[in-house]
Image (spheres, grey):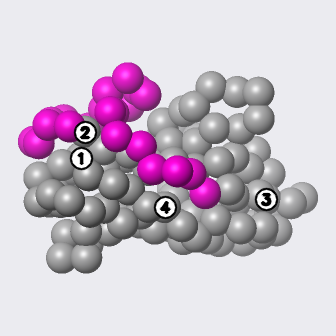
Amino acid sequence: VQLQASGGGLVQAGGSLRLSCVASGRTFSRYVMGWFRQAPGKEREFVAGISYSNARYADSVKGRFTISRDNAKKTVYLQMNSLRPEDTAVYYCSTNQDPFLPIGTTRAEYEIWGQGTLVTVSS
């Protein structure tokens, strides 16, 4: 499976962006999809994850970000509203090797990664 993320860019604080990640190569709906981010000098951190029926969010983005998926298009989205300068990072989409897993929140729980898309929020 391959993941292709897009949608990053430069936005002012308070603005919005929508990231997309297209998957190829397998039955998409069976697998958890996750978004992580990595700011300069920091560890990669969990942002949001979605299974067939549930979603989880990092506390830092709850109420501002929404993860969703379109199984027919094999695409997962991350709608980011009320963006803050501290949201600036490279955002990565990720998934599991195995289907029907619970939504993990650590990097180690995801084996497949996309290339990342840069989000820059100016103050």
Q: Residues within 10 Å of mark 4 (few under 14, many from 20)?
A: many
Residue designated by label 3:
121
> What amino acid does circle 3 point to?
Val
**Left or right of residue 84, residue 103 in this image:** left
User: Does the image show residue 53?
Assistant: no
Q: Give SS at disc 3.
A: strand
Magenta residues span 97-117
- The answer to whether mark 1 and mark 2 are in CB contact below 8 A is yes
Magenta highlight on residue 42: no
| Residue type pointed to by label 1 | Val
Rendered location of residue 27, percent (x, y): 11, 59
Residue 96 image label: 2
Q: Is residue 78 above or below residue 89?
A: below
Q: For marks 1 and 4, give the CA distance.
A: 16 Å
Describe residue 24's horizontal placement relative to residue 119 as left or right: left
Task: State the residue position of label 4.
Answer: 5
* Residue type indicated by callout 2: Asn
Q: Nearer the viewer, residue 106 or 1?
A: 1
Residue at horizontal 79%, vertical 59%?
121
SS category of the residue bearing label 4: strand
